[in-house]
C-alpha cells in the first residue's frame, strides 16, 4: 500500500439518499466504482437537512415525512486519477452536484496497534 501525501483533488458528489442506479443505491455504485478505479478513498455522509435543484427542503426531523435526505460522497486522489474517474460520474449522476476542490492530503499507512 502506498502513502498519498501532498497535492490532491477532492470530489464531493451531492445526491439524494433515494437515488438509484439499476435498483441499487447510487451512492453505493459510486463508492464501488471509485474502489474499482483505484481511488485512494471514498466515504458517504448522510445529511440531516438540505435542499437542491428541486428547492424542496429534506430533513431528518421526526415530524417530517421526508426520507430522501441529502447524501455526500467524498473521494480523494491525485488530479490525474480523479479526472480519469469523472466520466463515470457523468454516466451515473443524472441529478445532483459534483464539486472538485484542490486539497492537501496526509495519509498514514501501516501503523500497527503498538505504534
Image (cartoon, rainbow, N blue to C red):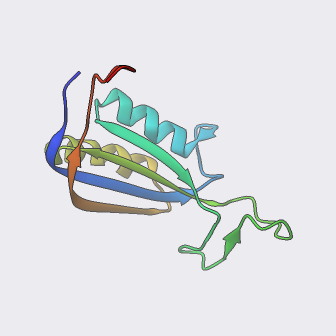
- With 47 as the anchor, is 93 left or right in this view? left
Q: Nearer the viewer, residue 61 or 100?
A: 61
- With 29 as the anchor, is 74 left or right in this view? left
Residue at the image point whose x is 35% and y is 27% from the top: 36
Q: Quadrant of the N terminus?
A: top left
Residue at the image point whose x is 34% and y is 19% from the top: 112
Residue 51: % across, % down? 59, 74
Q: Is residue 88 above or below residue 50?
A: above
Residue at the image point whose x is 45% and y is 38% from the top: 31
Which quadrant of the structure image shows residue 88?
Answer: top left
Farthest-out residue, bottom: 55
Q: Is residue 105 above or below residue 102?
A: above
- With 14 as the anchor, is 61 left or right in this view? right
Residue 114: % across, % down? 36, 19
Q: How many marks?
A: 0
Q: Nearer the viewer, residue 6 or 37?
A: 6
Amino acid at each position: 500500500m502506498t502513502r498519498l501525501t501532498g497535492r490532491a483533488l477532492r470530489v464531493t458528489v451531492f445526491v439524494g439518499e433515494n437515488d438509484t442506479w439499476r435498483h441499487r443505491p447510487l451512492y453505493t455504485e459510486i463508492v464501488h466504482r471509485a474502489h474499482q478505479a483505484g481511488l485512494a478513498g471514498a466515504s458517504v455522509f448522510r445529511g440531516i437537512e438540505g435542499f437542491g435543484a428541486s428547492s424542496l427542503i429534506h430533513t431528518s426531523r421526526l415530524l417530517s415525512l421526508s426520507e430522501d435526505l441529502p447524501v455526500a460522497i467524498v473521494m480523494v486522489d491525485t488530479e490525474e486519477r480523479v479526472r480519469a474517474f469523472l466520466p463515470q460520474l457523468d454516466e451515473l449522476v443524472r441529478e445532483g452536484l459534483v464539486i472538485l476542490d484542490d486539497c492537501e492530503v496526509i495519509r498514514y499507512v501501516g501503523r500497527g496497534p503498538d505504534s
